[in-house]
Amino acid sequence: MTSASTPVIEGRALTRDYLTGGGFFGRAKSVRALKGISFRVEQGKTLAIVGESGCGKSTLARIITLIDPASGGELLLDGVPVDVGRGAPTREMRRKVQIVFQNPYGSLNPRQKVGDMLMEQLYLNTDHTAAERRGEARAMLEKVGLKPEHFNRYPHMFSGGQRQRLAIARALMVRPKLLVLDEPVSALDLSVQAQVLNLLADLQDEFGLTYVFISHDLSVVKYIADEVMVMFKGEVVEYGPRDQVFGAPAHDYTRTLFAATPRADVESIRARLARKRAA
Amino acid sequence: MGRLLEIRNLCVSFDTARGPFRAVDGVDLSVDEREVLAIVGESGSGKSVGMLAVMGLLPATATVTADVMRFDGKDLLSLSVQDRRKIIGRDISMIFQEPIASLNPCFTVGFQLAEVLTAHMGMTGAQARARSVELLAQVGIPDPEARLSAYPHQMSGGQCQRVMIAMAIACTPRLLIADEPTTALDVTIQKQILDLILQLQQDHGMGLIMITHDMGVVAETADRVVVQYRGKKMEEADVLSLFENPQHPYTRALLSALPENAKGDRLPTVGEMMGASQ
Ligand SMILES: Nc1ncnc2c1ncn2[C@@H]1O[C@H](COP(=O)(O)OP(=O)(O)OP(=O)(O)O)[C@@H](O)[C@H]1O
Ligand SMILES: Nc1ncnc2c1ncn2[C@@H]1O[C@H](COP(=O)(O)OP(=O)(O)OP(=O)(O)O)[C@@H](O)[C@H]1O
Ligand SMILES: [Mg+2]
Ligand SMILES: [Mg+2]
């Protein structure tokens, strides 16, 4: 077993370069999307990542989940260095680390019924019987707030928020050790969002799951995170325990972010409507 | 103020293996020029499907009926396919909920923007290119000139969403339907985008339907709010009354389900609260 001091996942000075251009007119040039990112997450903890759109969060998510190689730096899973640029990760590693992609539409196979999709995860990764697989898949659908009649539907027959929940259900089927969630509740109304966040919290308590949670929603981050990392243009500008980051934000960008959060109080609405009438 | 869109008793049902499923059940809606109507409601309550019905973009398994569906005095249901196409994309445009699914992966961002501008605005290639750069800059894409030659998969989630927004506002439509337009954006860029849309609205008298689950966005943009639940309209109110004095238990539950209202280490869910309030 891993000792408490070995993080489930650790990044050391990770970088990632993308080649762009190279079409008709220009020569390919390289853009550095991650400029040396370091972090560590211990078992049963949640690291939340926030930052400007385009700052490199999804890029980092794909590196952590062994989908893309880093261009530089080191990634350690349970203390063991992994480099997918050199050799494909083992099936065991892949099972351990799951991802919920930012864009559920693109990550669900349009020709596969959702029940089959969920059962396939178990078929590939466990030796459960067919009846067990069916039962577990149905139970998981219910846990994310979907219904038994959804079992035989194709992904395109769902609403945006329902598809997002399908992606979460699929990732949870194999009981990963580390789950990277890229904007997993961005399409959910507050009610369903609460249900999903509670489910994640339950699983974390019960099985010690570790989460890397990317979100634009600061109230969600404040609720779910143990630690918060703020990224800006490919760099980490702030990183610390939740209460410290929210209580005493040190970087300008973090402060700008907090200040831009929309206000839903009646006084602010009144003021806005008055401005609109005056315009 | 002119009425732009008027819908009465809209119903949409889908054929499914288990028989018809009614996704939208007798919804009335209207929006005027220069008005912002927000639609909020539970995931799966028929918000997107209702608006896709207006756009005529539902699959063949959907049956759409309505007593009235009028845009600018024209009956959308009886228009020929050609006449409807002239309106859709030009006078009414939509920001789709899943941007990456509605951008074509095989063409560059610049090509897709230019296509909208040449088809609907009659621009030349050079004009369209210049306008595309301008639009990308307006939605806050850094280095817009260079980004014209990027493919959708080379952009971040929020950048794709902003390209989608640029495409939807490219023709300055008279009615813009924005389906969760800022879900992939951090709050600073969200603010920039909402300001941009509201400015267009002021300048051109555009009507706006904003589907969102973000009550902060509702508070900062809407004039009027419709609350939908399981295919039905539960409540409609001007924005101030809705926040001050929500009538329906679902609306009350929705407003109090904000994560900042968490008690203990679990969040209250609307189901629990509705159960408690009845
Ligand atoms: N395949 C690619 N080729 C070239 N550039 C890319 C590629 N993928 C991403 N980028 C660029 O790298 C930067 C970081 O992208 P990334 O998707 O990681 O951002 P993000 O923080 O997830 O943003 P968002 O919040 O909008 O989803 C962006 O500027 C993006 O345009
Ligand atoms: N092609 C289809 N076949 C069958 N049912 C469908 C189809 N498309 C959508 N539905 C169902 O119609 C209902 C309404 O879907 P819609 O996309 O309008 O929800 P929504 O209110 O936009 O939700 P969200 O907030 O999650 O996007 C959902 O229950 C969905 O499962
Ligand atoms: Mg992203
Ligand atoms: Mg929707």
Image (tube, helix red, strand yellow):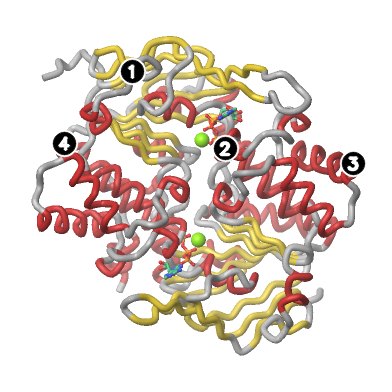
| Comparing labels 4 and 1, the label whose residue is closer to the camera | 1
Quadrant that contains the C terminus of chain A: bottom right
Marking on residue B153: 2
| Comparing labels 1 and 3, the label whose residue is closer to the camera | 1
Q: Where is residue B217 in the image (x, y as percent from the top left)?
A: 58, 52
Q: Quick check: marks 1 and 2 in contact, CB under 8 Å? A: no
Amino acid under label 1? Gly
Alpha carbon distance from label 4 to label 2: 35 Å
Horizontal relation, residue A231 to residue A95: left or right: right
Q: Which residue position is annotated with label 3?
A: B126
Instruction: State whether residue B89 is above or below residue B230.
Output: above
Alpha carbon distance from label 1 to label 2: 24 Å
- Mark 4, secondary structure of its residue: helix
Q: Mark 3 lies on which chain?
A: B
- Mark 2, secondary structure of its residue: helix
Marking on residue A207: 4
> Does label 2 lie on the same chain as label 4?
no
Along the viewing direction, whichever of B258 and B139 lies nearer the viewer: B139
> Does label 3 lie on the same chain as label 4?
no
Residue beneath the point at 52% across and 69% down: B49
Q: Is ligand 3 within 8 Å of the beta carbon of the residue shown at mark 4?
A: no
Quadrant that contains the N terminus of chain A: top left
| Comparing labels 4 and 3, the label whose residue is closer to the camera | 3
Instruction: State whether residue B64 is above or below residue B182.
Output: below
Amino acid under label 2? His
Marking on residue A87: 1
Q: Quick check: marks 4 and 2 in contact, CB under 8 Å? A: no
> Does label 1 lie on the same chain as label 4?
yes
Instruction: State whether residue A172 is above or below residue B75.
Output: above
> Does label 2 lie on the same chain as label 3?
yes
Q: Quadrant of residue B85?
A: bottom right
Residue beneath the point at 48% across and 70% down: B46
